[in-house]
Amino acid sequence: MNRTPVPADAPAPGAWEELVTTALLGTERRTPPGGAPGREAPVALLDAAAVETVRRRAGLRPARAAGRPEPAAEDPRPALPAAAVRRLALLLADRPGTGGGRRGTAPDLMELLPQWLAAVNARGFAPPPQALPALLDAARGRTDLRPAALVFAGPRAVWLARLNPDWRFALRATPGGGTALPDPEDAEQTRRLWEEGLFAERVALLSALRAREPAAARELLSTTWTTERAEDRLMFLDSLRTGLGPQDEPFLEQALSDRSRNVRATAAELLSALPGSALAARMAVRAAACVAVDRTQDSPAITVEAPHECDSSMERDGVVAKPPAGRGERSWWFGQLVEATPLATWSARLGGRTPREIVALPVADDWQGELHAAWCRAAVRQRDPEWARALLGAPSAPEAGGPGAVSLAERAKLLGTLDAAERAGWVAGFIAAHGLSEAFQLLGVCALPWTAALGGAVVDALNIARDAGSYPWSFSGVMGLAERCLDPAEASHLDGLLAIPDEREDASPGAGGYWAEAFQRLVTTLRLRKAMAEELEAE
C-alpha cells in the first residue's frame, strides 16, 4: 500500500534567525523553538538547525530565469601588448606575505602593481577582459590601488560590479555609479538631474561642471543651497576647490553664516586661500595686531601678543573657539589667525623684510614654534614657494635634521609647493647632510622616478649604513622606496654593492650578507621595472 508523503510543516517566518539567536544566548537562557527546557535542549537546538539547513538548501521553489544582462560597453582603447598581458597576470598572481619573514632577493610584485597601473593608464591601454576579476579582487583588498585600477578597468568595472556584490566599491568610487551625465549643452536635462538625481549623481554632475565651467557650477549649486542637508552642503562646497577664484567670494561669504559649523569652517578655509578676499583682509588685521618687531634690544626680534578672547566675528570667520586637548586657548586662536592671513601681510608689517629675513628673526617668549608652524600652513594653503623656501631653510642646516621650529612633517608639506626638480634637490642635500634616519617622510613627496642626484644620495647613504655594520632592516622602508622610485637605468651602477663585504669586528653578525641580499633584490627589481616599461612599448 502506497502512502502519500506528508509534507513537512512550512518554517515560521524568521525561523533561522530565531535559531541563531538561541545559539548565541545559550539554551539555558532561551528555549529552542518547538523544544522544551532542560538537558535535552541543546540536542533539540542542533536537530532544529539541521532541519532548517536542509530546508534552506533544498526548499527553493522553481522561478522564472532572470533576463540576461545587457552586454558591457565596448572599450575603445587599444589592447595591451601580449607581453604586458602576461606581466599583468604575474603581478596579480603575487600575494603578499606568502614567503614568510625574509624576502630574499625576489621583487615584491604587488608593490610594483601601482606603478605598472600608472604607466599603463598614461599610455591609454585597455585591460584584457579575463584579467578584470583578479584586478578587481586586488583593488578590493587594497584601497590605494582602487583609483588607478578602476581607470584601467574602464566601464566594464562598473558592469561587473553590478553583478558581484564583492566589487560594489567600483560603483561607490565611480561618480554616479557609472551613470552617464547629460550633455553640457542640455540645460534642461542638467537641471533635472541636479534636482531629481541621486546624491552620487549630483556630486558627479557638480564636479564635472565645475571642472569645465566654474561659474555655471556655482550658480547651479546656489539654486538649491538653502534646501540641502548640512552634510550634502559640505560635500558640494568642497567641489569649489576646483577652479577656486575671486568670483566665488560672494557665495563663500554667504556660507560663513551657515547653520553647520563644518560648512562655515570649509567656507572660511576656501576664502583664506584667496589672498584678496575680505575674510583674508579681516584676518590680516587681527593677526598683524598680534605680531610686531621689538627694536628696543640690540638686535630686532619678533614679539607676539596672542588674542585674549575669541569673539563672535572671529568665530564667523572660521576660528574654532575650543582648542583640542593639551592646547592653550590663546595659542590656538593665534595659530588660526596667522594661518588664514595672506603672507604678503608680513613684509609690510615687519619692516619690508623678505620672507627669508622674517623667518631668520628670533621670536621672543617661546612663540617661534607656534608662529612658524602657522606660517607653514599658510604657505601650503596659499601655494607660496618663496615662503616655503624660507621656512624650509638650507637642507644642510643642523636644525633641518632634528627638532626645530619646522617639523619634518611640515617640511614634507612645504616641499609639495616646489617644483619636482627643486624638491628632489633639497631632499638630496638633506640626505647628504643628515643621512636616512629622518628622510623617509621627505622621500615620499618626491616625483618619480627619482632624479640622478637624489637616487645617488640615497644609494650613497645606504652604502654608508652598510659600512657602519648595522643590519639593513633598520632601513627597510627606504630600501622599499628605492625599489619603486630609483630610475631603472641606475641598476648597472649598483653592481659593486652586490658582493659580501669583509665584516668589521664591531659589525652585527652576518650583516654583510643581509646587505648583499637587499642590494641584489634592489637591482633585480630595477631590472624588472625596466622590462615592464619595455613591454608596454612593444608592438
Image: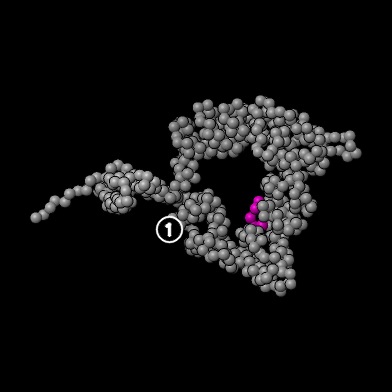
Q: Crowding at label 1, few (<14), some or many (≥20) Cα neighbours within 10 Å?
A: few
Q: As shown in the figure, which amino acid type bears the numbered disc 1?
A: Gln
> Who's the residue at 64% across and 27% down the image?
316
> Who's the residue at 78% across and 50% down the image?
399
Q: Residue furthest front?
A: 38
In the figure, residue 376 lies in which quadrant? top right
Magenta segment: 444-450
Residue sitting nearer the eye, 226 or 131: 226
Q: Reply yes or no: does residue 52 show up in magenta.
A: no
Quadrant holding the N terminus: bottom left
> Who's the residue at 53% across and 34% down the image?
231
> Who's the residue at 53% across and 31% down the image?
230
Q: Residue furthest right?
A: 298
Q: Residue furthest bottom?
A: 502
Residue sitting nearer the eye, 527 or 18: 18
Whole-percent x and y of residue 494? Answer: 67, 67
Q: Main secondary structure of the magenta part?
A: loop
- The answer to whether residue 217 of the structure is visible from this angle is no
> Taking 322 as reference, is 170 above or below it?
below
Whole-percent x and y of residue 480? Answer: 62, 60
- The answer to whether residue 13 of the structure is visible from this angle is yes
Whole-percent x and y of residue 472? Answer: 66, 64
Q: Number of numbered discs present?
A: 1
Q: What residue did someone put label 1 on?
A: 130
Whole-percent x and y of residue 380? Answer: 68, 42
Residue sitting nearer the eye, 539 or 176: 176
Q: Is 49 left, or right, of 382 in this rendering?
A: left
In the figure, residue 524 lies in which quadrant? bottom right
- Element under disc 1: helix
Q: Is 335 left, or right, of 139 in this rendering?
A: right
Q: Is 97 left, or right, of 377 in this rendering?
A: left
